Each structure stands twice: as structure tokens, then as C-alpha cells.
Image: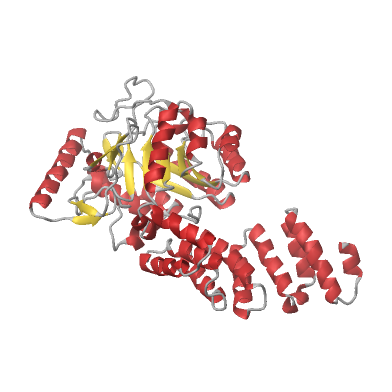
Amino acid sequence: MADKLRSNEKMNKHSVTSLLEIVKKYRHSGKYSEAEALINEYKYLLQNSPELNFELANIYVGLDKIEKAVEIFEKLLQDRNFDIICTVNELIKLYNRKGEHSKAVDCINIAAEKNKYNFSLLIEKFIQQRLIPDGQSAFETLQNLKKIKNNESEMFVKNIESVEKSRQIIAPYRVFFTWGMHYKCNYSCTYCYAPKPHDITFDNNKNNRASYPATQQLIDSWKFVFDNYGMSRIRLDGGEPTVYPDFYVILKELLKMHRLQLNTNLSFDVQKFCDNADPKSVRVDASLHCEYTGLEDFVKKLEYLKKYGYKIVVSYVAYPDFINNIPMAKKIIQDEMNIPFLIHPYSGFYNDRQYPASYSEDEKNVIYNTDYKSITELTWRAERKGNYKRGEKSKDIKLKKYQIEENELAKQIKQIENKKDKKFKLCEMGRMYARIYPNGNVYRCCVYDGNTYLGNLFDKTIKLLEKAEKCYDIKDCRCWRCMIPGEESRWLNTWMDDWEISF
């Protein structure tokens, strides 16, 4: 058919239809380059064919030429010369990928000019507004949804408001948990803070020793959370979560209720994982550990997961011995595979020096050049854990462990003083987030066991705070992601991403 089309000296309306038919077949079979080349051969037809432009934009999406696709979709929307709902739906997907949720709202507003009470449009607008640090606009859209009187809209509103509605309409719009499942790991990385596998007590925290309740008890506990707080996002942490007893049974059951982030060293059987986990409901946060795996094997597993549609993020600890591996890993994983590659500065001792304060300028440059966002974490870790005097040269830093313990005690004392002086900040941690230890104990956050005990997951005594509460760790909070009301522009993007766009 393509040859027949090319033989026509003069293209007419019928030929445009034929061209569209061929291009669509190419696209649906994944032959994006062939489809693009064919359209370019008859580029002059684009001028009078919105359908062909729409198809070209979708081809650009397949080729990962996102900016070109957005440009075409935006023009179609402004010209109002194509199916406006279809155009908006495609734009929303791309804006989500780019994290430009305000633009998504703007394009929905254009579509809503003649469809003011279109149910699907209002739902999408509500979802996008909840990804922007502006709870009020989402609330207003919710009120408009209530004006639509049909079973579908009423059910949606009921679902939003049924589980402590205030948690559903202000940032970050869902309860988040970090569940440290246990301390066991099949790796024994030099730089890891967790107990090593030969430590049979796994006593990472004297108040929170690991315990392993029955599998059904665990599932029932998370059902209790679902019934009380709705669909939550749970970060499965460890140790290595995938070596937890009955891991795949637990995984499948949790995915029926919640969304998951799996923090893993990727040592598991990826085919078995794909058979048990829906890529729409779980994100894989894979950590690359060069002591235990080669880059080639690690990348093969990434390719397999990406093929099945999983959202993947790769992290790497900038341990002094392995910093030189960073540029190559970044080139393959981020530049070639288009998977985010994040650097976590090392916190701890190396050759009697305290890190990250002891990084040389060259080492810092390697980190920054790979992941510019890491400067926030590196600065935070240096201030919280390096504890060095400003202006002091890194080569002179040789902090001892007892000094760090003294510093932590001093910070706790400072909290007590702030409480006495009534100096505090309000924080949503404990209401919108909680940390769960391997024995099921639940705390408000990660600071000194979270300051506030919130019950136990396993025995279903977990009870989150009802409102933002006072925190007396004012200037030295160890979490740069803490949920301070009014500072959403700082922290909201660290909790939400393009993987989490529906509710």
C-alpha cells in the first residue's frame, strides 16, 4: 500500500486517508521511525490535516521526542481544529511526564469552556490540582463535582470524602508510609548503616527489634490501614524487602489496596516479580551496589522491568571507593536508558574521616555533575552529620563516633529547650506520613524514633494524628522532606511524581 501511495503524483483527500491508515499501522506495530519518515515524505499534507498532525504527535511520543509532541498537541488545542478532548487527554499524559501539572490544568480549562460540567474533565482537573501546592483550587473543583448529579460523580465524591476527607484535599493528598520490613539483607555493603547478615540479632534499634508476624496477620493489618486511611503509598524498605518471608504473597495482597515503592538491590528474579506486580501500582527504586553486582547484569534487569512498563529510579551511594564508577553508570542508565539516576552522599566514616563533610572538591564535582539535585541532600547531610565548623578544610576533619553521639544528644536537649520556650513549627508528619519499624511500631517520622509513638501496625493500634502538630526540632530537622504547611513548593515534588497521578 505504501508503494501504491507513493506512485500517486497528486495527493487528494482519499490519499490522505490512505496515508493515515498506513501510518497508524506502523505506529501500532511500534515502527515509529518508518511512520515518521513516511509523513515527512508528504509533509505538505500536514498543513490541512489535523488528524495527520495528531498522528505525528503520537509518533513523536513513541520516539521519546516529547517536546515536539507537546508542541503539536498545544497547537491543535489552540486552533480548536481537532477533537479537543482527545488532544487534552494526550497533553495531560505528557505534562505529567514533565511534572508540569499547572499546564495540565490550563489545557483542561480550555476544553472545559464548552464542557463546564463534563464529569471526566472535572475529575482530571481535580487530580492535577492535587499535584500542585494549592489545595484550595482542588477543593473548589470538588465543589463543582458535587453539582453533577449522577451515580458516577456521587460515588467519586463519596470515595474522596469517606476516609477523613481533609487528608484527601490537601497536600500531599494521600498518607505515605515507610515500612522497614526487616534488617536482613543478602548483601553486606561496606557503607550500609543496617546490621550485617552475620548479626543474628538484627538489633538495629534496641526499641524496635525485628519480628515476623504471620503473613495473614500482616495482610489484615494493612487492610486495617486501608479501611481507616484509604489507599496509601507504602515504601517497602529494609534490609532487602524481597528476602522477607512470603514476600510475593504479601506483595500481591498489598497491591489490591495500596500503591507501593520497592526499595531494592534488584537481586531478585525479575520475571517472577513481573508475574506478581502490576506496573501501574508499584515503582521500583533500585540501588546499584558495585560490591555485589556488575553493571551489565544490573542493566539487563532494568531493561526487563522497563519492557514491562515499570516506573524505575536508580540510586547510587557515593562511597569514596566507588565514586569513579558514577560517570559510566550514569551514561548507561540515565543518558541511554532514560531512567533517573540519583546520587546519595555517603554518611559515615572512611579512613577515620567523617563523610560527607570530607568529600574533596573533585569528588563533589562528580556527584554534582551526575545529579545536581544531590546538592540539597549533600548539604543537609554535611550540616546534620558532618558537624564541622564552617571554613574548616575537609582534610582536617576527623570526627570520632562519640563526638557524633554527643552532637545528637545536644540536638535532643535543644528540642527540650525549644519546647520550654514555646518555639515550634507545625508539621504534617504523623498525619500524612509515618515510619514503621520491623516490629510494627509506628512513629511520626524518622527523628529520634519520630518523637511521637503512633501505635503498632501488627496489632492494629496504629492511629495517625488528626491535624498538623507541633515539632520542636526547628532548625536542625534531619528531613529535608518534612511536610511544613505553607512550604509545599519545597517538599511536595519529593512525595509526588508522574507515576502517581490517579487516586
Q: Position of residue 15 (x, y in %)?
A: 85, 72
Residue 25, compared with residue 134, is above or below; it is above
- The quadrant in which residue 193 appears is top left
Q: Residue at x 41, y 32 (%)?
A: 218
- The quadrant in which residue 93 appears is bottom right
Q: Position of residue 498 (x, y in %)?
A: 50, 56
Q: Is residue 287 visible?
A: no
Of the 4 image quadrants, the one containing the N terminus is bottom right
The mark tally for this picture is 0
Frontmost residue, 440 versus 279: 440
Q: How is the image coloured?
A: secondary structure
Q: Position of residue 163 (x, y in %)?
A: 38, 51
Q: Position of residue 353 (x, y in %)?
A: 27, 37
Residue 197, compared with residue 283, is above or below; it is above
Residue 450 placement, left or right of 341:
left
- The quadrant in which residue 320 appears is top left
Residue 48 placement, left or right of 253:
right
Q: Residue at x 56, y 62 (%)?
A: 94
Frontmost residue, 201 versus 130: 130
Q: Residue at x 20, y 56 (%)?
A: 425
Residue 501, compared with residue 462, is above or below; it is below
Frontmost residue, 346 versus 474: 474
Residue 352 placement, left or right of 214:
left
Q: Is residue 106 visible?
A: yes
